[in-house]
Image (tube, rainbow, N blue to C red):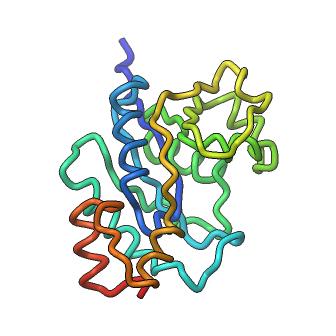
C-alpha cells in the first residue's frame, strides 16, 4: 500500500515583514482546509516591487522563522533563494515536487492574485495539477476561475493589513506592535528595520 502523501500548502510572499494577517490566514488554513502543514515560501526580489524597502533575504527568513517557531504545522521555506530569478511559481513547484516526492503540494493565494492568475507562467498547468485555496482580499472582484474544481474559496477573516502599511507606520515612528507577533516585533525593533 502506498503511504499517504503529507498535504503541504504553500504560502508565497516577500513577507517584508510577516504580520498577524499572514499568521491568521496560515493558522486558519491548517485548521479548516485539510492541510497537514503550511510552508511560508519566502520569495526573493519581485520585479514588480520596490527594492529600496525590501530587507535582505536572510532577515525576512529569520522573521518568518521567529513568527512560526511555536507552531509545528507552520514552517519557513527558502527554496526560491536557490532558484533563478525572477521566481516563477511553476518552476518552484517542480523543484519542490522533485525534492519532496512524498508530499502533495497546494497553493494559497489572495483573491486579488486569482484575478491576475491567467498572467502567470503556465497557469493552466498549475490549475490542473494543484489545489488552490483562495482567501478574501479587500477590493478584489469575483472572477471566472473561482468555479474551477481545483479552486476552493476559503473562509478566512478578511484583514486589511499590509506589509507596506506596517513599513510606513514604522517610518512615521508609530507603534506597530499589535500588527506583528511578539518575536517579529522584537527582532524588527532590535534591528531598527524600516526606520
Q: Is residue 147 above or below residue 145?
A: above
Q: Position of residue 164 (x, y in %)?
A: 54, 69
In front of the other: 191 or 105: 191
Q: Residue at x 37, y 44 (%)?
A: 24
Side of 123 where 132 appears, left or right: left
Front residue of 46 and 154: 154
Quarter placement of the C terminus: bottom left
Q: Is residue 62 left or right of residue 153?
A: left
x and y percentages locating residue 57 in the rendered image: 45, 75
Name the residue rendered at 63%, 51% in the picture: 89
Residue shown at the point (30%, 61%) measured from the top left:
178
Q: Quadrant of residue 34?
A: top left
Left or right of 155 on screen, residue 75: left
Q: Position of residue 22 (x, y in %)?
A: 42, 51
Q: Which quadrant is home to the N terminus?
A: top left
Say if 140 sits above or below 166 in the image: above
Amino acid at each position: 500500500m502506498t503511504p499517504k502523501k503529507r498535504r503541504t500548502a504553500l504560502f508565497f510572499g516577500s513577507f517584508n515583514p510577516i504580520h498577524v494577517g499572514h499568521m491568521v490566514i496560515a493558522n486558519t488554513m491548517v485548521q479548516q482546509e485539510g492541510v497537514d502543514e503550511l510552508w511560508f515560501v519566502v520569495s526573493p526580489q519581485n520585479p514588480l516591487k520596490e527594492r529600496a524597502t525590501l530587507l535582505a533575504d536572510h532577515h525576512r527568513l529569520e522573521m518568518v522563522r521567529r513568527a512560526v517557531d511555536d507552531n509545528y504545522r507552520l514552517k519557513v521555506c527558502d527554496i526560491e533563494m536557490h532558484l533563478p530569478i525572477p521566481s516563477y511559481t511553476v518552476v518552484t513547484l517542480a523543484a519542490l515536487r522533485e525534492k519532496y516526492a512524498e508530499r502533495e503540494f497546494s497553493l494559497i493565494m489572495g483573491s486579488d492574485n486569482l484575478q491576475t492568475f491567467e498572467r502567470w507562467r503556465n497557469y493552466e498547468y498549475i490549475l490542473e495539477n494543484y489545489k488552490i485555496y483562495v482567501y478574501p482580499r479587500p477590493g478584489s472582484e469575483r472572477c471566472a476561475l473561482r468555479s474551477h474544481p481545483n479552486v476552493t474559496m476559503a473562509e478566512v477573516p478578511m484583514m486589511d493589513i499590509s506589509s507596506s502599511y506596517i513599513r510606513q507606520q514604522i517610518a512615521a515612528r508609530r507603534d506597530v506592535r499589535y500588527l506583528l507577533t511578539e518575536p517579529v516585533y522584537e527582532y524588527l525593533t532590535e534591528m531598527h528595520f524600516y526606520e
